[in-house]
Image (cartoon, rainbow, N blue to C red):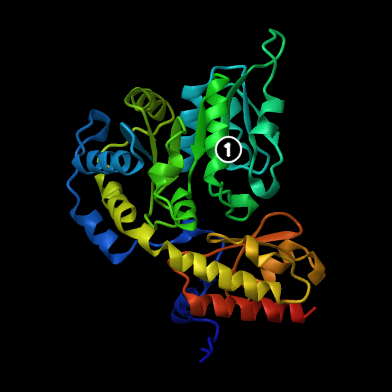
Amino acid sequence: MSTVISNGTAENAEQRARLTVDLRSDTVTKPTPEMRRAMAEAEVGDDVYGEDPTINRLERRAAEIFGREAAIFVPSGTMGNQVAIKIHTRPGQEIICEERCHVFNYEMAMMAHFSGCLARPIHGDDGILRWAQIERKITPKTYYYAQTGLVSLENTHNMAGGTVYPPPIADEICDAAHAAGLPVHLDGARVFNAALALGKPVAELTRKFDSVMFCLSKGLGAPVGSLLVGSRQFVTQARIYRKSLGGGMRQAGVLAAAGLIALEQMPQRLHVDHENAKFLAQGLARVPGIKLDPAKVLTNIVICDISGAGMVSADFSRRLAEKNVLCGAVNSELVRFVTHLDVDRAGCERALEAVQQVVGSR
């Protein structure tokens, strides 16, 4: 049944907002009622003094789940990644990463600004690097070369369409990098999606990485926050750099309370997002002018080429928004749809109907 919305009143604006299907990102999720209650009732203290009991509980639990000695709560995934880069490198070094990765493209050149390092980006098919590619880019031990200081991987790989590192490939990279004297960091913003797709626990997937960052505020649905896990010594250093970036929070237990629910309960529902993404991908692939391979959609991200529809991504996104469906433009030809807990199957069906209308109107 369709709902007709007239223009001109606050009530109608609220109705329109409720009917919007927001597929721009899984960062747009709202905290669940249980999270909101936990936030209101959270026991708090001063986290800079290490006295917030809810923060401490969240950090201990994250370390347990990932099989690590310690963890630290940070406001954002970007901060977590950049703190890790700072610890693993020294100024004047290079960081090997995939060319579409988040640390290179979407973190404000902070590896240069904060750590004094340059990226050495490599193209990986479907965003997945192999050790042979990495090995060729490690600089010789000659004084006039910038030395390689770190390898950084991303799992799932956001801008490659939520692709997942096969464990043997990730393990080989870690083993070979360590043999070459290089640490390996994992941007695991959506690593729980990767774990579900592979049917393996996150501790097993990430055990060989020197550090791992993961987000609570994407598919897990918490309103704020990420965690960085590693050795006890690593996390001690991370507290210093978190503070230097302005990330020393006070009564942050109100955030950690939602994070605990996200960590304990929300991974079990990620399969719904994956199923909806697959449904969306299969429907988009049937729309004339839209190109993608649904078989490559393994998690909750769908990236498709709309150039065959006779418009650029900005126009496509704008016309969809007029029909209360939101997506994100990757570049002039590619658009991204991300499923999450606030978009159900009916919402995906509405999104497909809107896409068909937008493309068919050309």
Please name the residue shown 33% across and 55% down the image. 262
Please name the residue shown 17% across and 47% down the image. 43
Splitting the image into 4 quarters, where does residue 240 fall? top left
Q: Confirm whether residue 182 shows in the render.
A: no
Splitting the image into 4 quarters, where does residue 249 fall? top left
Give left or right: position of 32 versus 49. Answer: right
Splitting the image into 4 quarters, where does residue 360 fall? bottom right
Image position, residue 310 (x, y; %): 82, 70
Check the image and report above or below for 157 versus 46: below
Check the image and report above or below for 88 versus 188: above
* Secondary structure at numbered mark 1: helix
Image position, residue 163 (x, y; %): 59, 53
Which residue position is annotated with label 1?
A: 103
Check the image and report above or below for 237 versus 24: above
Single out the residue that lies furthest toward the bottom.
Answer: 1
Please name the residue shown 58% across and 48% down the image. 157
Give left or right: position of 39 versus 325. Answer: left
Please name the residue shown 58% across and 40% down the image. 169
Q: Confirm whether residue 87 shows in the render.
A: yes
Image position, residue 285 (x, y; %): 70, 72
Mark 1 surroundings within 10 Å by alpha-carbon count, few (fewer than 14), some (14 through 19), many (20 or more): many
Which of these two is toward me, 278 or 95?
278
Q: What residue type is labelled 1?
A: Val
Image position, residue 95 (x, y; %): 61, 27
Which of these two is toward me, 115 or 152?
152
Give left or right: position of 71 versus 210. Answer: left
